[in-house]
Image (cartoon, rainbow, N blue to C red):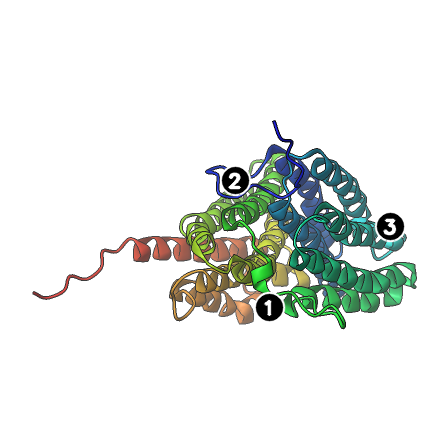
């Protein structure tokens, strides 16, 4: 019997796009990362803390989504790919453990782990496809060069004074984010094309859906842990139910139809790489960010139901707005809509209308949390009814 030598996924089988157990095991590292990010934001609830946590979130997401691209191309059931994922898990744990002090004493630890993963991954992939066509090898060469270029800024920032670290890392992240958008163009090597990114759309859709579940699960974990340590008063029960309903509404908004439409579009597309770059690689950062910020807001409304702060109000309004915006953009680009869904746009406007009253301290955090939860539930019900409304009958 001929041994299989290629490390690429075998396409065409009914289960070829199925997410493997090793990929789910790998994702457990990012449960820890999401928890670290929400705690970091809660402990540094200021304008600077917002910027720092946003930057760290994008870095964490970038590690995860790039790994999902790699395991879309390479077969995670093959031993070399599996060992690569184990090594990446080690890097992910080190990076996640560095998050609380990433802008303090562990900046170089965070940057070192990030760069090692971002550069090492495409180099491994380049070795894995050494016997494949030239276009595939060139693609990984370009990705590795872009990662190495950004890595210089990451490492310089990690070694720099904490007061200026954010500027180095913002420059590094700008390079990272620009890479896929500019098709990893490199002088002398040209640029990739979305046609080179011949991914399995079903796999990419399922992978990103699983990360949404990770983020929502962390939100429920935080809510349950906080409620368990509180006295069960009427106010605390109200905050608990509000947080739970908010998480349910978020799940509904993404998984009831949004994930299904995205899956159908990318699975049936002749250019899945283009859709994956836009709808999953970039737009999903907003969705994940919205969940994490909303989890922080839920914690504030439970632990400090009567105390208001500028940064806390920003979390309570910003989380749902980010989530609705991300879902609106995702559903817009993954369907035949000519405009974003009206329910989501009006939901964003309703929350924005709360800004004057919220910053005027007319609402306590608990009341504000209940109102924003009500908006999310309303948007979910509106979309559910709109999508299931029978089409108008044509006159004979």
Task: Give me the residue at 78% from left, 62% from top.
Answer: 145
CA separation in Å, label 3 and label 1 = 38 Å
Marks 2, 1: nearer the viewer: 2
- Local secondary structure at mark 1: helix
Q: Which residue is mark 2?
A: 16
On the picture, is 177 further left or further right than 346? right
Q: Position of residue 371 (x, y in %)?
A: 48, 57
Mark 2 and mark 1 residues within 8 Å of each other at the beta carbon? no
Q: Position of residue 387 (x, y in %)?
A: 32, 56
On the picture, is 336 further left or further right than 349? left
Mark 3 and mark 1 residues within 8 Å of each other at the beta carbon? no
Task: Give me the residue at 66% from left, 48% from top.
Answer: 70
Residue in the foreground of this view, choosing between 39 and 266: 266
Q: Quadrant of the N terminus?
A: top right
Q: Which residue is mark 3?
A: 109
From this viewpoint, is residue 52 visible? Answer: no
Q: Position of residue 330 (x, y in %)?
A: 49, 60
Give the class, few, some or many, for how many residues have Cα within 10 Å of label 3's Cα (few <14, many ≥20).
many
CA separation in Å, label 2 and label 3 = 37 Å
- Local secondary structure at mark 2: loop
Residue in the foreground of this view, choosing between 59 and 355: 59
Q: Which residue is mark 1?
A: 359
Which numbered disc, 2 or 3, marks the residue that appears first in the sequence?
2
Task: Give me the residue at 69% from left, 66% from top.
Answer: 184
- Local secondary structure at mark 3: helix
Give the class, few, some or many, for how many residues have Cα within 10 Å of label 2's Cα (few <14, many ≥20).
some
Marks 3, 1: nearer the viewer: 3
């Amino acid at each position: 019997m001929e041994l299989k030598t290629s490390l690429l996924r075998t396409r065409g089988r009914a289960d070829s796009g199925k997410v493997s157990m090793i990929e789910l095991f790998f994702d457990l590292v990012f449960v820890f990362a999401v928890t670290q990010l929400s705690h970091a934001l809660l402990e540094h609830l200021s304008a600077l803390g917002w910027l720092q946590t946003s930057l760290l979130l994008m870095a964490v997401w970038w590690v995860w989504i790039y790994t999902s691209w790699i395991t879309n191309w390479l077969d995670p059931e093959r031993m070399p790919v599996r060992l690569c994922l184990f090594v990446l898990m080690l890097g992910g744990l080190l990076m996640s453990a560095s998050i609380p002090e990433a802008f303090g004493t562990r900046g170089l630890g965070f940057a070192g782990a990030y760069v090692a993963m971002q550069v090492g991954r495409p180099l491994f992939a380049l070795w894995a496809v050494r016997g494949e066509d030239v276009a595939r090898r060139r693609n990984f060469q370009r990705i590795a060069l872009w990662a190495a270029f950004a890595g210089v800024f990451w490492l310089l920032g990690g070694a720099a004074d904490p007061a200026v670290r954010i500027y180095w890392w913002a420059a590094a992240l700008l390079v990272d984010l620009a890479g896929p958008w500019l098709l990893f163009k490199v002088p002398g090597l040209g640029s990739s094309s979305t046609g080179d990114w011949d991914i399995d759309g079903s796999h990419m859709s399922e992978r990103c859906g699983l990360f949404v579940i990770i983020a929502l699960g962390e939100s429920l974990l935080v809510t349950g842990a906080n409620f368990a340590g509180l006295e069960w008063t009427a106010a605390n029960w109200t905050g608990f139910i509000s947080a739970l309903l908010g998480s349910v509404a978020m799940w509904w908004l993404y998984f009831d139809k949004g994930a299904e439409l995205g899956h159908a579009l990318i699975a049936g597309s002749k250019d899945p790489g283009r859709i994956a770059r836009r709808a999953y690689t970039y737009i999903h950062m907003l969705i994940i960010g919205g969940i994490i910020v909303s989890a922080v807001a839920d914690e504030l409304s439970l632990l400090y139901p009567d105390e208001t702060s500028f940064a806390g109000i920003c979390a309570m309004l910003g989380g749902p707005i980010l989530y609705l915006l991300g879902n609106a953009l995702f559903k817009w680009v993954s369907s035949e809509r000519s405009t974003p869904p009206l329910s989501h746009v009006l939901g964003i406007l309703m929350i924005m209308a709360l800004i004057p009253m919220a910053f005027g301290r007319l609402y306590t955090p608990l009341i504000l949390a209940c109102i924003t939860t009500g908006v999310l539930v309303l948007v979910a019900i509106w979309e559910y009814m709109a999508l299931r409304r029978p089409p108008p009958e044509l006159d004979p």
